[in-house]
Amino acid sequence: MHVEMAGQLPVEREEAFWAGVENARRFFMGEADVHRALERLARILDEKGIPYAIIGALALNEWGYRRVTVDVDVLLAPEGLRALKREVLGRGYVEKFPGSRGLRDTEAGVDVDVVLAGEYPGDGKPKPVVFPDPAEAAVRGRRVALLSLDKLIELKLASGMSAPHRLKDLADVLELVRALSLPRDEELSLDASVRAKYRELWQAAQTAEAE
């Protein structure tokens, strides 16, 4: 049977496709550069006694929603960021640009994006939901500290609700509901300002995917 082709895929596009496949394979095997960067950062923060919580896509993976990412997102208090910079700048880390809060792990070639306690998610404007102190909101494991699941969901809802360019945060909550079979009454652990959006996404997550 003859199959009609829409066109020829450029060589560079096909190479990029297979590079993406390989990156995803390494990520889900726990062998990606971002995993090396995470392990190194967590070790330094723990050794120096700096409170932190891993957030973003790496936290989503740890909580049960698997998706690829290429950078490390970490929540710090302002004094924690100052302490971290004193310890690591010029020792395998550089600022992403002069004076930035974000760092780059030069050994792994991975960006470390820092969010500060006390700031507001999404559009950055004052709202009931705020990035918490990691010393109070982190859940400790043997090798890493994560932001608690309820706080992660709360922040993502507040972010996606207030910033049109952060709609992915709402999709992340929907996928967490699916992946973890979260109950509707999970909303009771969330700030009142985001509960209606959680109910909406919970309901959407109950729709079965077409075969």
Image: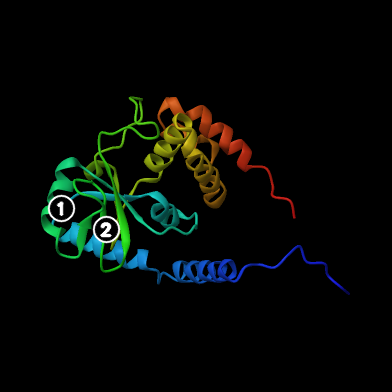
Residue under the point 49% across and 54% down:
65
81 sits left or right of 139 in the view: left
Q: Which mark is residue 85?
A: 1
Q: Nearer the viewer, residue 36 or 97?
A: 97
Image location of residue 160, percent across then percent down: 47, 35
Image location of residue 77, percent across then percent down: 20, 42
Q: Look at the image and tell me in which quarter the C terminus lies.
A: bottom right
Q: Earlier in the sequence, mark 1 or mark 2?
A: 1
Q: Which mark is residue 104?
A: 2
Q: Is residue 41 above or below residue 82?
A: below
Image location of residue 84, percent across then percent down: 16, 53
Callout 1 environment at 10 Å: few (<14), some (14 to 19), or many (20+)? some
Q: What is the secondary structure assignment of the residue under circle 1? A: helix
Q: Quadrant location of residue 205?
A: top right
Q: Quadrant location of residue 69?
A: bottom left
Q: Disc 1 marks which amino acid? A: Lys
131 sits left or right of 159 in the view: left
Q: Nearer the viewer, residue 129 or 192?
A: 129
Q: Nearer the viewer, residue 91 or 171?
A: 91
Between marks 1 and 2 in the image, the one whose residue lies nearer the viewer: 2
Residue under the point 28% across and 37% down:
132
**Furthest residue in direction right, as rendered:** 1
Q: Disc 2 marks which amino acid? A: Arg
Q: Is residue 163 above or below residue 44?
A: above
Residue under the point 33% across and 32% down:
120
Q: Which mark is residue 58?
A: none
- Measure how far apart labels 1 and 2 are at the Cα level: 11 Å
Q: What is the secondary structure assignment of the residue under circle 2? A: strand
83 sits left or right of 23 in the view: left
Callout 2 environment at 10 Å: few (<14), some (14 to 19), or many (20+)? many
Count of numbered tags: 2
Q: Nearer the viewer, residue 42 or 199?
A: 42
